[in-house]
Image (cartoon, rainbow, N blue to C red):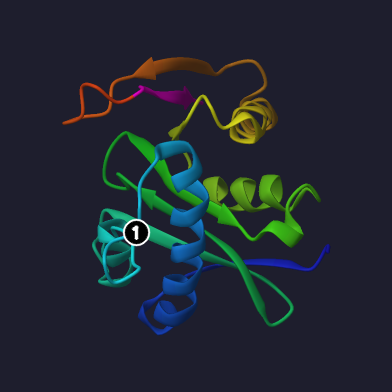
Amino acid sequence: MSDLVVRRAGASDRLPLERLWLMFRHDLSEFQGQLPRPDGSYRSEWLESVLTGDPDWAGYLFHTGENPVGFAFVRALTQPVRVLNSFFLVRPVRRHGLGLRAVQEVVGQHPGRWEVAFQENNAAAVRFWRRVATSVSGDAWSEEKRPIPGDPDATPDVWISF
């Protein structure tokens, strides 16, 4: 599984991104407790920001061969600190080093400071994002819990800055 290709996504990638998005939101529902909408979809405003060309957003699609295997969405491109807003790999390619490679390629496209949020109850994400931060910036990274805007009763997200 060493043939990972990371490329900027565009409007022509709508169909694979929409399908991967559903898998991503389904995976997160285990940790966030969100149910699908009556039509089977999940909220998708971040996906729409990427697909409609919002200048503050960028999407990246990951492939191995002809198969789409994941994506990353970056926001705050016009800000001093970029946010890796959404990151997903399909299960068969996880734990092979592709996620770390994908993040390194995406981060390399937008030099500067970065932040990423994840849920503390997602043990795999906790391990992954700490490993990413260390690989990208050595020990020059920090971690903090932040409340979720507009949802004061929700468990705070963990944010890593590097």
Crowd tier of the residue under label 1, counting other residues whose Cα lies within 10 Å: few below 14, some 14–19, many 20 or above: some
Question: How many circles with numbers are drawn on the protein?
Answer: 1
Is residue 160 in the magenta section?
yes
Task: Report x, y in % for residue 117.
Answer: 43, 33
- Frontmost residue, 35 versus 75: 35
Is residue 95 shown left or right of residue 79? right
Q: Is mark 1 on a helix, strand or loop?
A: loop
Above or below, 49 against 128 in this view is below
Q: Quadrant of residue 114?
A: top left
Tell which of 74 and 17 is nearer to you: 17
Front residue (pair 96, 11) = 96
Residue 68 pos. (x, y %): 61, 73
**Measured from the top left, where is residue 139 in percent x and y?**
64, 15
Q: In which quarter of the image is residue 36?
A: bottom left
**Residue 85 sits in quarter:** top left
For the point 51% across and 24% down, the residue is 120
Indicate whether residue 96 is drawn in magenta.
no
Using the rendered image of the protein, determine whether residue 41 is visible from the camera's viewpoint.
yes
**What x and y, as percent, mark residue 144?**
43, 15
* Residue found at x 73% / y 52%: 94
Q: Which amino acid does label 1 sit on?
A: Pro
Q: As rendered, which of 21 and 53 lies closer to the eye?
A: 21
The answer to whether residue 110 of the structure is visible from this angle is no
Please report the bounds of the magenta region as a residue range.
Answer: 155-162
Outermost residue toward the front? 38
- Residue found 83% across the figure and 62% down from its top: 2
Residue at the disc numbered 1: 36
